[in-house]
Amino acid sequence: MAGILVAVFWAILVSFLAVVLVRLAQVLKATTKLVADVTEQAVPLLAEASTTVRSARTQLDRVDAIASDVQEVTSNASALSSTVASTFGGPLVKVAAFGYGVRKALGKSTEAAPQKTSRRTVIVGRTVPAARRRKQKG
């Protein structure tokens, strides 16, 4: 009887291991299928990502070219500005100084001969002559 009991026990154990191995085989098949599907989807995605990176690099090269052109234009504008300042700056200062001197000279000749103008001040609705104004102030 003990032999039958051991044989039944081994039969149950082998059946249990057979079920576990069948389940493990199914899991491995599903895993293999999943890896194959991921590979099929990943390869086009990687190709698309590579294309996007190449496109981005091309755009960055264009932006770099534009930035260098802007830098060149900026340096040209700076050189032009300093050239204009050195070319016209000195003569403009001299012309301005000459004009100021002429105005001063003409202003002194008109100041030398004071003009007599009759100024009147209005006080509460009436006009007071300039002579009387001086008296009122003092």
Image: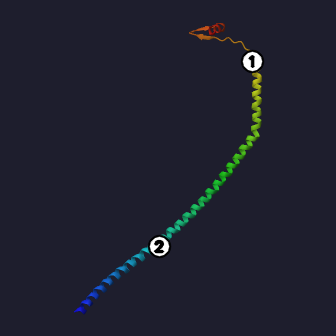
Residue at 66% of width from left, 51% of height from top? 71
Residue 12, percent across and down? Answer: 28, 85
Q: In the shown orientation, is residue 28 left or right of residue 114? A: left
Counting from the top left corner in percent of width and height, residue 20 is at 33, 81
Please give the residue where the numbered disc 2 appears in the rendered image. 39
For image coordinates 54% across by 66% down, the residue present is 50
Which three-letter amino acid code belongs to the residue tagged 1?
Glu
Left or right: 62 in relation to 88: left
Q: Is residue 81 above or below residue 111?
A: below
Q: Nearer the viewer, residue 72 or 18?
A: 18
> Tag 1's secondary structure?
helix
Mark 2 residue type = Thr
Q: In the image, which disc is placed on residue 111?
A: 1
The answer to whether residue 96 is above or below residue 49 is above
Please name the residue shown 51% across and 68% down the image.
Answer: 46
Taking depth in this image into account, of 1 and 106 the one nearest to the observer is 1
- First in residue order: circle 2 vs circle 1: 2
Q: From mark 2 to mark 1, how far is it between C-alphas?
A: 100 Å
Q: Position of residue 82 (x, y in %)?
A: 72, 43
Assign a secondary structure to mark 2: helix
Residue 28's tag is: none
The image quarter in which residue 1 lies: bottom left
Residue 113 in which image quadrant:
top right
Residue 52 located left or right of residue 84: left
